[in-house]
Image: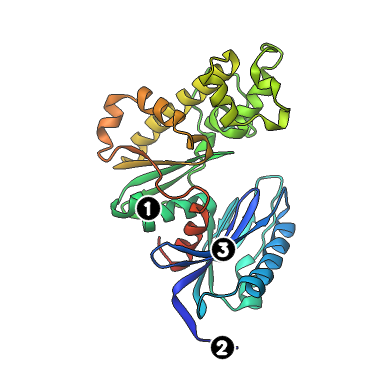
Amino acid sequence: MNTKTNKGTCLAVDLGGTKLLIGEVDSGGQLLRSKKYKTGYLTQTEGTKVIFEALDDYIAAVGWINERPGYMGMGMIGQVDYINANWLMIDPSRKENIPIGSLIKDKYHFDIRIENDVKAATLAEKAFGTGKADKDFIYLNIGTGIAAGFIADGRLLRGWENDSGEIGHIVVDIDSDVECECGRLGCLEAIASGRGMYKRALGLREKHPDSQLFNFNEDDISAKKIITAAGAGDTLASKIADEAAAAITCGIMNLIRVTNPERIILGGGVMADGWMYRQILDRIGKKELGTVKKGIVLSELNPGTVGIIGAAAVGFGFC
Ligand SMILES: [Zn+2]
């Protein structure tokens, strides 16, 4: 085997809920080339098989830019043991302990580092994004689900099981009757995530049968469609979107009190069209905002590639 490697690039793998992206990223955070692979609702064993098949294809069909990359990093959905490079679970119903790092090392001879996908995106902000010069910031990903990454005193906060940042399950309304998958009422994720808003629309259908949301197929109701319908004055959509905005704002105001960040960086699909961002800025308390000296900002990294850039940040060893 040719052991000459390119220390300037990282082979990066981003395994999300619906897609797998493999690519080569340089040390400045530029994605040089990549290929997308389809995934779906998979167990970890199935997901591991998909990763290996995709890596085989990538290496054969796309190949290296120059020499073999000197680093490899992976961002993965679910919980990981980043020290031993084990993939611990996707969610409580899909829980296996897969030594993905050593499996990859045995087959492809890469020393790989792995991290949870939202923590990887947080490291992308720290290494290559808006948080580059910040010692203390919070990255919030508000998409299908909700989670956060905390950089405090320049370091990523992980927790003893590397399970910090699951802020989707902080309660933002103690009087809420909105049930969360975790069993509590009033969790941020149940009210304000893409999946949460979708489930609320279906749950409130009987009370609002005339809502324009039900002009769509059930499966096509998304956060984006709810926000658009809210803008057009739809009563149900306005209720869901307004309550989501209030919940996110409350969550942010709480988090500001926890780690005293100098900046909050917002990313994820629910933030994408700018409506939710404006709502948050209109609602946030001046007192809370006043302590965040660099403000609440939208991520400047491409939402389609922040995951793979983050995987590279992990591979290069930023933390
Ligand atoms: Zn919950």
State the CA–CA distance, disc 3 to disc 2: 22 Å
Location of the N terminus by quadrant is bottom right
The residue under label 2 is which amino acid type? Answer: Asn
Which residue matches tag 1?
Answer: 129
Asked if one can make out residue 43 in the rendered structure from this viewpoint, the answer is: yes
What mark, if any, has residue 34 been given in the picture?
3
Towards the viewer: 198 or 186:
198
The quarter of the picture showing ligand 1: top right
Check disc 2 and report the residue beneath it.
2
User: Which amino acid lies under the numbered mark 3 shown in the image of this protein?
Assistant: Ser
Between the residue at mark 2 and the residue at mark 1, the CA separation in whole angstroms equals 34 Å
Which residue is depicted at the point 65% across and 33% down? 181
**Quadrant in which the C terminus appears:** bottom left
Residue 219 image-quadrant placement: top right
Secondary structure under the numbered disc 3 in the rendered image: strand
Q: Are marks 2 and 1 in contact (CB under 8 Å)?
A: no
